[in-house]
Amino acid sequence: MTEASRKLLIVEDDTGLLKQLKWCFEDYDVFTAEDREQAIVELRRREPMVVLQDLGLPPNPEGVDEGFKTLKETLKLAPHTKVIVVTGNGDQKNALTAVAEGAYDFYEKPVDTDTLKLLVDRAFNISELEQENRRLQNRVNESPLDGIVAASEGMLAVCRMIEKVAPNDVTTLLLGESGTGKELLSRALHNLSPRKDQSFVAINCAAIPENLLESELFGHEKGAFTGAHKQTIGKIEVANGGTLFLDEIGDMPMPLQAKLLRFLQERVIERVGGRQEIPVDVRVVCATNQNPQTLISDGLFREDLYYRISEITINIPPFRDREEGRLILARTLLQKYCKKQKRALNGFTEDAMHAIESYSWPGNVRELENKIKGAVIMADGKLVSAADLGLRVDGEQPESLNLREVRQHAESKAIRVALTKSFGNVSKAAELLGVTRPTLYDLMNKYGMSADGYSKKSVAAFE
């Protein structure tokens, strides 16, 4: 951006000083205003990147109330605008207050034009850098799936799998901790599929009592049990033609697992208390935050059902492993909730960014979303602080200095990135890591990793 295209709004009621400032900034695209009303009109009309504003404005140029009102309205209308307030000589208290309320910087009179020009020029440079940063962030945020912010290697790999799997009628299993976005990804599978115009029906197998879950899924006939006063259609039938999402399938009772297995094999159901076989055309997506192999070993999940629901398995990385995308997702959520709450917040303070990056996030994305939602309501200034997020700056879990722990963390992260880049090809991943294939297998076993979640083989048939 050239200096000639840089828009600068000067808000000053002293005509002599205003004339001097216009001459000083003749290389810029300068607009002027003498009071709050004119300033807001020019702000709306010109959309300047930088505002140079006197705190003492009419009708009380000796006070600062009107100046602070102007500052507040300016930042509310244009939160990314850099406002430099000009204060009286020695009036540092009001200058610091203005900065606390969102002003970019301050300058005390008397005016030295050379110094002020440097200050304004720096504000333009910062504004342009932030504008470019927002543009690049928006490009990163445009993941292959609507509504999903994918900036880390692990999540980009998940998005690539979702795109490939979605157009095909295969039963898909999503594995990930609570709060990692399993339902959002299941909806993406539906929205990218030929069934997108049909129903998407979700049911949480852990949230419904065992004695009601069968009826909820398969429906029941009138008189099938006490209280069954009419025929009721189950969720599977409701989803006919569309997608059925079975969340927390690991909590499904064993007797019901047998009935679900029969449906997946035959694609017919019988309502509770009924004898008629009803064909249903539905795509099934399942999810769990548990380890299916452990459930099978403990006798809590049928092995044959596991193989039926996991024609394709997608492992969703926990939020703590998405280091590259934490701040990007945090900023995206901040914009979302600022819009909902009609708040004009400019971003995060340094301590908030440090806290977001260093916190372990046991509640994953859901925890981040809840903290940002609350911070948008609680924030007093123009930036969200660590205190607003309810996070400690010093970190509730300080970074370990134990060399063994540091080495293990670095090793596991490097393996995940290598598996992602090689689409689960262990030989290629080993080559990237500079180790032998047997060594990589040993390391994967050490950290409880599997190449399946990163594998391109599972979707090769659809390429």
Image (cartoon, helix red, strand yellow):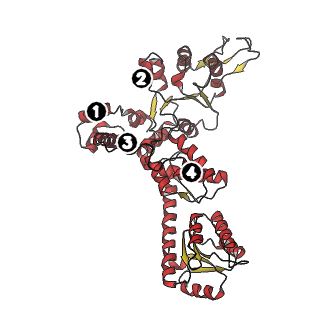
94 and 199: which is toward the camera: 94
Q: Position of residue 114 (x, y in %)?
A: 48, 84
Q: CA distance from mark 2 to mark 3?
A: 23 Å
Q: Position of residue 78 (x, y in %)?
A: 62, 65
Q: CA distance from mark 1 to mark 2?
A: 19 Å
Which residue in the protein does label 2 denote?
293
Judge depth for marks 4 and 1 and give the one in front: 4
Q: CA distance from mark 2 to mark 4?
A: 41 Å
Which residue in the protein does label 3 denote?
420
Q: CA distance from mark 3 to mark 1?
A: 15 Å
Q: Position of residue 365 (x, y in %)?
A: 52, 42
Q: Position of residue 286 (x, y in %)?
A: 53, 28
Mark closest to the chain's N terminus, 3 or 1: 3
* Badge 3: residue crowd in 10 Å (few <14, some 14–19, many ≥20): many
Mark closest to the chain's N terminus, 2 or 3: 2
Q: Could one spot residue 49 in this view of the protein?
A: no
Q: CA distance from mark 3 to mark 4?
A: 35 Å
Q: Secondary structure at mark 2?
A: helix
* Disc number for residue 332: none
Q: Name the side, left or right, on which 229 lies relative to 443.
A: right
- Figure quadrant of residue 49: bottom right
